[in-house]
Amino acid sequence: MGGHKGFVLWFTGMSGAGKSTLSERLAIGFKARGYQVELLDGDEVRTHLSKGLTFSREDRDTNVRRIGWVARLLARNGVIAITAAISPFAEIRDEVRSDVTGDSTAFIEVYASAPLDALVERDVKGLYKKALAGEIASFTGVSDPYEAPSKPEITVFTSVDSVEVSERQIIDYLVAEGLIDGGSEIA
Amino acid sequence: MGGHKGFVLWFTGMSGAGKSTLSERLAIGFKARGYQVELLDGDEVRTHLSKGLTFSREDRDTNVRRIGWVARLLARNGVIAITAAISPFAEIRDEVRSDVTGDSTAFIEVYASAPLDALVERDVKGLYKKALAGEIASFTGVSDPYEAPSKPEITVFTSVDSVEVSERQIIDYLVAEGLIDGGSEIA
């Protein structure tokens, strides 16, 4: 318990690119190692932070900023804060990065990269089909922009590599940076 | 750093009853002792969590729930989370208490008690004067209800006791409950 340094592990990428899968696996692994971990993703964030927000640009930015603020508070107090929101706009991600690093806390941006073709083909939740048919307004990558990071700390190629390979890549980076211990297996 | 157990120190009370003053002093003292501490109060909360919310009952509840959720995440990861919102409604405070204690985290409700007369007389920010003149809608204790807690862990009588006495009372309680060390002076 406690005693380790916190950091923000910030996933970004389009719907279906593997952010949630990877972040959940990592959170479980970190917890098993005794780290303090919070995963800010999905229903909890929607219920507690985002309720009432729309898909307007302003509201989407507000949502990402709020997640960033909570991640920042956690990380500067020794918690590994993992976020898995699409967070499509570079400007807002960079704003959060600036706030986090301003506390002398590490901000690790993980770009879950996969070509739209691959995401449309896989379409696990059937959302791309609907978006391409015009049934979902403001769908990132289809009817709304996604701005890929220009200098992410890590890029995982989730349409090419297995989940295990991408997870290992992230862990290796964190160990190399001294953010987690490399002593034992995590995955 | 870290290694200690987190808890939520939840102030409630009317405007001007001393929540912010006490919570700021305590936060400074805890930090000086090496504890991980976050104070959720004032501008930061308004900017990062509450922007766009009105003073309707529903929005006020949403605000308090959000503060509660962030405090909960912090406290279950070993942080002393101090909140200083008026949080006028018992039902919402109890909901937060239930969520926090559901994580096996201590929730310490501190009621900053002061009679309305005393608050109106002191009126540091001039808000009661305006509220009584009808210039502020939905002002807690004047035109909006304040529900005092029926079983707070601590009640501080801030119109009678000095800040130092109230602060000492809270610290003594926390030491007695084993939530902080009693070894050295904090205030």
Image (cartoon, coloured by chain):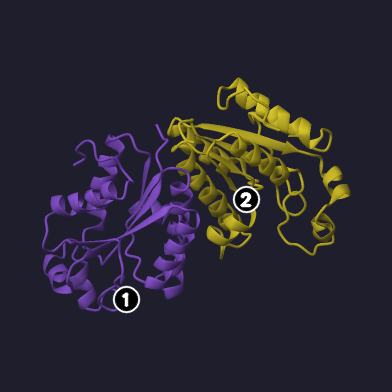
Chain colours: A yellow, B purple
Q: Disc 2 marks which residue?
A: A41
Name the subunit of mark 2. A
For this rendering, which residue is in front, A162 or A115? A162
Residue A119 visible in the displayed image: yes
Instruction: Answer above or below: position of A44 versus B59.
Output: above
Q: Residue at x 68, y 27 (%)?
A: A185
For this rendering, which residue is in front, A149 or B183? B183
- Which amino acid does the dot numbered 1 rest on? Ala
* Helix, strand or loop at mark 2: loop
Question: Splitting the image into 4 quarters, where does residue A126 fall?
Answer: bottom right
Residue A147 visible in the displayed image: no
For this rendering, which residue is in front, B147 or B50? B147
Q: How many discs appear? A: 2
Residue B50: image x %, image y %? 44, 59
For this rendering, which residue is in front, A20 or A11? A20
Give the side of residue B85 with respect to residue B127, left or right.
Answer: right
**Which disc number belongs to residue A141?**
none
Q: Residue at x 41, y 35 (%)?
A: B2
Instruction: Answer above or below: position of A78 versus B101.
Output: above
Give the side of residue A69 with respect to residue B18, left or right.
Answer: right
Q: Disc 1 marks which residue?
A: B137
Residue B39: image x %, image y %? 35, 48
Q: Residue at x 63, y 41 (%)?
A: A27
Name the subunit of mark 1. B
Identify the image quadrant of the N terminus of chain B.
Answer: top left
Q: Distance of mark 1 from mark 2, alpha carbons?
A: 37 Å
Residues marked 1 and 2 touching at CB (< 8 Å) = no
- Which amino acid does the dot numbered 2 rest on? Asp
* Residue occupying the far right of the picture: A121
Q: Residue at x 44, y 52 (%)?
A: B105
* Helix, strand or loop at mark 1: loop
